[in-house]
Amino acid sequence: MVWQKNSMKLNLAIVAQSLNAYTETFIQAHKEIQGMNVRYYYGDPLPTMLENYGVLEKNKWFSTLYHYTRKMIASPFNDRREDVFAWSLRKEKIDCVLAEYGTTGANILTVCKSLRIPLVVTFLGYDASVHQILRQYEFAYKDLFNYASAVIVVSRSIQEKLKSLGCPAEKIRYSPTGPHDRFFSVTPDFSQKLFISTGRFVDKKAHYYTILAFNEVLKQHPDARLVIAGEGALINVCINLIRFLKIEYAVSFPRVITLEEFSEYLSVARAYVQHSITAMDGDMEGTPVAILEASAAGVPVISTRHAGIPDVVVDGETGFLVDEHDVLGMSKHMLNVLENEQLARKVGANGRTFVGKNFNREAHLEMIARTVEDAVSTGIDSRIY
């Protein structure tokens, strides 16, 4: 049966790798899509959990039934978790699946094909850039691009990358998310010589470059301060670096912070700083949500010409961009906003206006809703098999 618009609510399954990773607020926002019954599955590489339900295969009878039915009928799946996931999708009467990350979409493709459920996929960064991922999923991505009703990307750089990988241009939808509304309510007073940054301590975030740039700032402004929030494998490297530079007094690592705490830092900070780079393994950003949030708060952003960041930051107008690895260039911009509060206020205000006009959270969610509706209305074309 082809779904008729406005006739009933669609049942949408969102499939992600984790339940509520602190770095994936953009995925959590997708649960807020209006007009749909959303079911949130998670697990990696295959979903094994359903939010507010628990483990998919938690009933003893299912295990017995599973072994019995596999002997009676030929299952199309090679992995027991696929059988369980398919069973749950049927039980929940899912009309469409939204896969968060291309790798997730590729991993659940067999199930969606078997059930003839439309599949929409979001590509968010590493899934379109890490060399090993691109090698591992080379053929799976081709199948995914062929089957998927639509592919959503959060940056222009990912859009071009997917085209080069063979994704049909007509299937690609460019739609970066927007910041939470609370950040537009922040009133920055620029009262402290504070720089704030957030994000996982991983290669592509290159927090050590931010520290080195800030160290140059301290030579002229010893009362300046830097806060880098987050967790990750490289946090001890950064702690050792500030010890070596003897600037422990000026740099702090509050680990994971809430949106409320981030808002409080932004309300007094002079700028948001983030020195993103392309990691040695190819890993790249999508469109960093923290940069959107900082701009929405009216705080200037100092960052790099990397991935989707130039989509968000207009160099010299809403923030300042330097080339990757340009530590001295970043330090000069940090000094500039530190010594010129009026410049910081002007650039921050420009950023708030620009993000408010071009990166709307509700518009992003509405676009996904329309994409899902179109996928269900169109159905699955048998020719893709």
Image: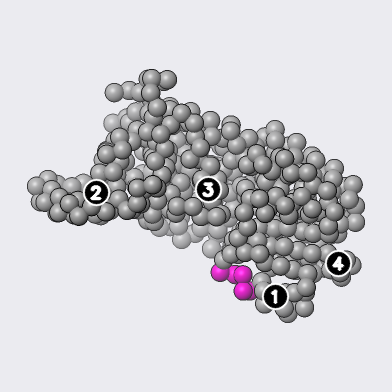
State the residue at coordinates (55%, 59%): 282
Q: CA distance from mark 1 to mark 3?
A: 30 Å
- Image coordinates of residue 211 in percent, x first then y, are 73, 67
User: In the image, which disc is placed on residue 124?
Assistant: 3
Which comes sooner in the sequence, label 3 or label 4? 3
Q: Nearer the viewer, residue 14 or 128?
A: 14
| Lateral position of residue 133 relative to residue 248, left or right | left
In the rendered structure, does residue 234 fall within the stretch colored magenta?
A: yes
Camera-nearest label, 4 or 2:
4
Residue that lies at the very extreme toward the left in this rendered image:
72
Camera-nearest label, 3 or 4:
4
Q: Check disc 2 and report the residue beneath it.
A: 83
Q: Check disc 1 and report the residue beneath it.
A: 241
Residue type pointed to by label 2: Asp
Near mark 3 (Cα within 10 A), the count class, few <14, some 14-19 or many ≥20, is many
Q: Check disc 4 and report the residue beneath it.
A: 223
Near mark 1 (Cα within 10 A), the count class, few <14, some 14-19 or many ≥20, is some
Residue type pointed to by label 4: Asp
What is the magenta range?
233-237
In the rendered structure, does residue 145 fall within the stretch colored magenta?
A: no
Which comes sooner in the sequence, label 1 or label 4? 4
Which comes sooner in the sequence, label 1 or label 3? 3
Q: Is any part of residue 203 visible from this angle?
A: no
Q: CA distance from mark 1 to mark 4?
A: 19 Å
